[in-house]
Amino acid sequence: MTIDHPSFGRIDDDRIIIFDTTLRDGEQSPGFSMNIDEKLRMADLLASLGVDVIEAGFPVASQGDFDSVYEIAKAIRGPVICGLARTGGRDDIARAGEAIRPAERRRIHNFISTSPLHMKYKLRMEPETVLDLITRGNTEARNYTDDVEWSAEDGSRTEPDFLCRCVEAAIRAGATTINIPDTVGYATPDDIEALFAMLRERVPGAETVIFSAHNHNDLGLAVANTLAAVRGGARQIECTINGIGERAGNAALEEIAMAIRTRPDAMPYRHNIVTEHLLRTSRMLATITGFDVQPNKAIVGRNAFAHESGIHQDGVLKNAATYEIMTPESVGWTKSSLVLGKHSGRAAFRDKLRALGYGELGDNQINDAFARFKDLADRKKVVYDEDLVALVDDEVRDHATLRFVALDVTAGSRRPAEAVLELDVRGEPVTATAQGAGPVDAAFNAVRAVFPHQASLMLYSVGAITEGSDAQARTTVRLQEDGKMVDGQGADSDTVVSAVRAYVHALNKLITKRQRAEPEALTA
Ligand code: KIV
Ligand code: ZN
């Protein structure tokens, strides 16, 4: 069976549409918010990864969200660009329509709750009102684009007869994709397969639309539920890089893409994901947000292809297939991630950055990054791709107001720690000296002396980027001020410098946020 779709044309029955919601549902997880530049970089990587749809944000939620969706719609070519809207929200659909306008192919995704619990307590609406809004919302969305998705929030806990009526109303009003989320991650794979099969069987017009799965991971079943939805007839999968998302997250894109690629016997479907780009996309997200995946995370975790036991190592050396069901290269791990040496020139450096997904850097950013690379290569025996990524990410971060210049620290068990810090504050060098309980405390006090502020430090965490005692540290600092929370990241082979870079990054974000004076964003 094939379907004629407004954005994709004729879609064969074995084709799976990958809908990435890292920049919307993913960004809703605490601490994962991204600024426009970071979202643009992620969107660019998602496009080269081959996702079919990028859900770029929730335009009515805040001016920042609107701007991100608009800029992504303007800059990114390839995937359909989608904006989220509430069905029945006051300006939601108009704002979403406006934000996606510059895109080559655009989608409005509107949603409303349909479960008894949500209708009664959250919406305080009668089912008939919800039905009416579904008709009105999807009709309105079609004024902006032919590609309209409708979601039944808490769909998996919705009473089946009512869900059928809702889906039928959405299709009649012009929705071309019907998404049935397991919003609270409650369903089992059997439930989900049966739910999609039931809808396809019972709803008039079901054969003209694409059904979509959106599963949360509260019971660790998001990926299994998503693959079960495909068995039940869903042909769009909503997922996120590294499985980030509300609470326990969404289904992980990299796991679904590799499950389908690795087991064509059990899952005879096709998707357009360039799986060799999975690792770099995952890494970029971790760098931008400051949250690494756990080492044993499938596909992209540090240990996903590591063999510790002697018996396994011996087997892999004889024949990798003994313990590897997919090759590390097929998801982007390279045999040697050794980067350039300290004698490498600027051209080789630029080429390497391009290969790592940083083709768009300006000359100033390249020059600054190159200077830091030379400095790092002098101090560190081996510079890996991961080191380079961390260093370049540091350079392209928000330096609108403050920029790190230099830090000297004295510390140890005999005397109080003291830090002498120089920052560039709006183009002017400012230096301060401060003491503290330890070197990081002294350095943070010096930041406060250079640039006085009221923000409270909520989180400070450090991890090593690679192995060895000369490894660069990657630091996350979370600051809070007037109910606004931001995370900053920093990297350096000196742990205290890394911490200060992270603190300065967080402050820059806070200042940018303050200047925009955004109201607290809505989430879906
Ligand atoms: O989980 C959910 O129900 C959602 C909808 C907005 C699609 O994220
Ligand atoms: Zn969700």
Image: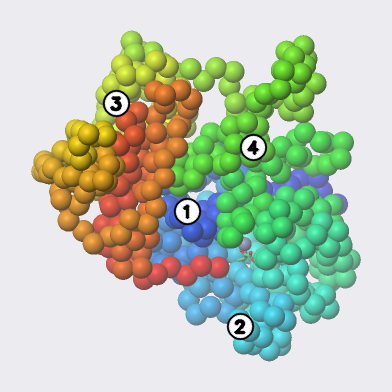
The kind of residue on which mark 3 rests is Arg
Task: List x then y, in percent, for residue 350.
Answer: 38, 23
How many neighbours does mark 3 have within 10 angstroms: few (below 14), some (14-19), or many (20 or more)? Answer: some
Q: In 3D space, how far apart are the residues under numbered discs 1 and 4 (Cα atoms)?
A: 21 Å
Residue 130, compared with residue 72, is above or below; it is: below
Q: Which mark is residue 296?
A: 4
| Quadrant of the displayed image that contains ligand 1 | bottom right
The kind of residue on which mark 4 rests is Asn
Q: Can residue 427 be seen at all in this image of the molecule?
A: no
Q: In 3D space, how far apart are the residues under numbered discs 4 and 2 (Cα atoms)?
A: 40 Å
Residue position for label 3? 372
Say which of 44 and 371 sits in front.
371
Task: List x then y, in percent, for residue 81.
Answer: 54, 54
The kind of residue on which mark 1 rests is Phe
Q: Can residue 417 be seen at all in this image of the molecule?
A: yes
Task: List x then y, in percent, for residue 425.
Answer: 15, 46
* Left or right relative to 375: residue 227: right
Comparing marks 2 and 1, which lies closer to the viewer?
1
Measuring 35% from the left and 40% from the top, which residue is drawn there?
Answer: 490
Q: Earlier in the sequence, mark 1 or mark 4?
A: 1
Asked whether disc 3 touches disc 1, contact meaning CB atoms under 8 Å apart, the reply is: no
The kind of residue on which mark 2 rests is Leu
Measuring 75% from the left and 60% from the top, which residue is drawn there?
Answer: 211
Residue position for label 1? 32
